[in-house]
Amino acid sequence: MSDLQRLAVAAALVVVLTLAGGLLPLVRSWSRKTVRLLLAFGTGVLLGAAFFHMIPEAVQGLGEGVGGAVLVGFLLIYVLERFVMLHPCEEEECAFHHMGLAAFCGITLHALIDGVALGAGISIPHLSTAVTLAIVLHKLPSSLALTGILLHCEYPRRRIVAMIGFFALATPLGAVISFSVLSDLTGSMLHAAIGFSAGTFLAIATADLLPQVHSAPEGRFRNLFALFAGILVMTLGE
């Protein structure tokens, strides 16, 4: 399978799962327990992809300099989450600090950054499966959360469908742009992009998703098991 074919398959999976997660709440509601379980598994996959696949690959091209690339990616997400984008509350009663259009813009920007990571992973064929899986598996919970916010803000259902559709295309768009640039890069620049993407995965997993996974005491052992299951899945790809 060529790089373009892998990119097309990954983009299709992202779009399908994002639409599924975003449109299902319009049909039936999902419990917080179920969403946290999905988040826990997706978080484990992100961590496994970063530590078992992306960082080791980046080390081969950057050596001791890999730390800088990972740190830049981590700090970019941290700064955006704290000062630009929406940020998950640590309290069970509040889903997000910002609502409505602000939430949509923040999550969509997040999806574009995911696309950059996806394009970087596709550029190195043996990373494509790990990176695609990591991104795909946290798309469904993200779109569930976005639709929940928009329903809470009493957005018309037609408008919600349109916004979820736009959100679903954000990651493929970022991936196409990233892949177009990175496919012409070789050596340390490409490995720096992989290290940067690993840093964004670590930031999303630790600062964004884990606080939501453990936002309530109930089901904490089940969520912990799901977290380790996600990590285990990525070790099987070694």
Image (tube, rainbow, N blue to C red):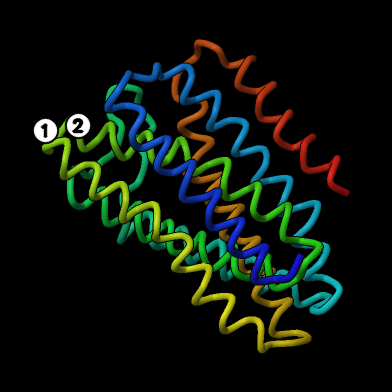
Mark count: 2
Q: Which of the 4 image quadrants contains residue 71?
A: bottom right
Residue that numbered label 2 is attached to: 151
Under circle 1, the secondary element is loop
Q: Tell whether 215 sits left or right of 6.
A: left
- Could you say which disc has been placed on residue 65 in the image? none
Against 213, residue 138 (above or below) is below
Residue in the image at 67% along x and 37% along y: 44
Percent of width and height locating residue 237: 84, 46
Q: Residue 154 got which mark?
A: 1
**Is disc 2 placed on a helix, strand or loop?**
helix
Q: Position of residue 10 (x, y in %)?
A: 60, 56
Mark 1 surroundings: few (<14), some (14-19) or many (≥20) residues within 10 A: few
Task: Tell me the quarter of the picture where residue 126 sits.
Answer: bottom right
Within-10-Å neighbours for mark 2: few <14, some 14–19, many 20+: some
The alpha-carbon separation of the residues under discs 2 and 1 comes to 5 Å
Report the side of 25 relative to 37 (left or right): left
Give whichever of 164, 48 is nearer the camera: 164
Question: Is the N terminus in the top left, top right, bottom left or bottom right quadrant?
Answer: bottom right
Does 24 sit above or below residue 82?
above
The front one of 212 and 179 is 179
Q: Viewed as shown, does residue 121 lie left or right of 219? A: right
Q: Amino acid at mark 1?
A: Glu
